[in-house]
Image: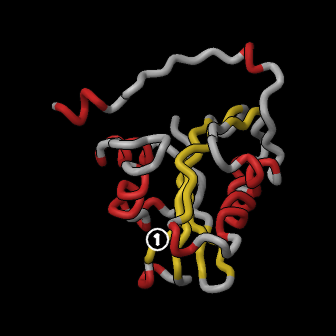
Amino acid sequence: MSISPPVLEVQSNGYCVSTDQDRLDFDVIHGFLRESYWSRGIPRHVVETAARHSLCFGVYKGADQASNAQVGYSRVITDYATFAYLADVFIVADHRGQGLGKWMMATIKGHPALQAIRHWVLFTADAHGLYAQFGFAPDEASADWLMTWRDPAYAALIAG
């Protein structure tokens, strides 16, 4: 059984944060992610598949769908009960410095379907200060975390 929470939309100062998957602009999302340090070269179909299996948060300039200019994105991979992994968080350069990243994070952490989450995780190389404002901190017990890492993960997909 798949859980799909109702669409959430929050508006402020001419922007909208929405979980409506139909509003996602994959030209913007893929364009940013394929150049980011954490997913350089990621194929578009991988971005789209990941989004379809995540709770996505889009940030849009303009409050209605007609002005659907996407300026930010993040996604939460979760079971809606105990665990959530926050990934692919960004605000495009032209819209940074307006508090949109903080607002998106507050919307994510306040989402009604995510209130029972016991463990939140994320990886960042450059935004520790932002995430600390929302309770994230380095894991003192990181030796308990195990993972595998394919680097470069997308090489075979890009070549073939």
Which residue corresponds to the image point at 69% horizontal and 18% vertical from the top-left? 145
Instruction: Name the residue beneath numbered marker 1.
Output: 70
In the image, residue 35 sits, relative to residue 160, either above or below, namely below
In the image, residue 142 sits, relative to residue 31, either above or below, namely above
Q: Residue furthest left?
A: 160
How many numbered marks have been drawn onto this rendered protein structure? Answer: 1
**x and y, in percent, of residue 46 in the image:** 34, 41
In the rendered structure, which amino acid carries the disc numbered 1? Gln
Which residue corresponds to the image point at 80% horizontal and 19% vertical from the top-left? 141
Quarter holding residue 30: bottom left
Which residue corresponds to the image point at 66% horizontal and 72% vertical from the top-left? 97
Task: Report crowding for label 1: few under 14, some 14 to 19, many 20 or more residues within 10 A (C-alpha).
Answer: many
**x and y, in percent, of residue 40 in the image:** 39, 43
**x and y, in percent, of residue 69 in the image:** 44, 76
Depth check, front residue: 9 or 96: 96
**x and y, in percent, of residue 78 in the image:** 61, 38
Q: State the quadrant of the C terminus.
A: top left
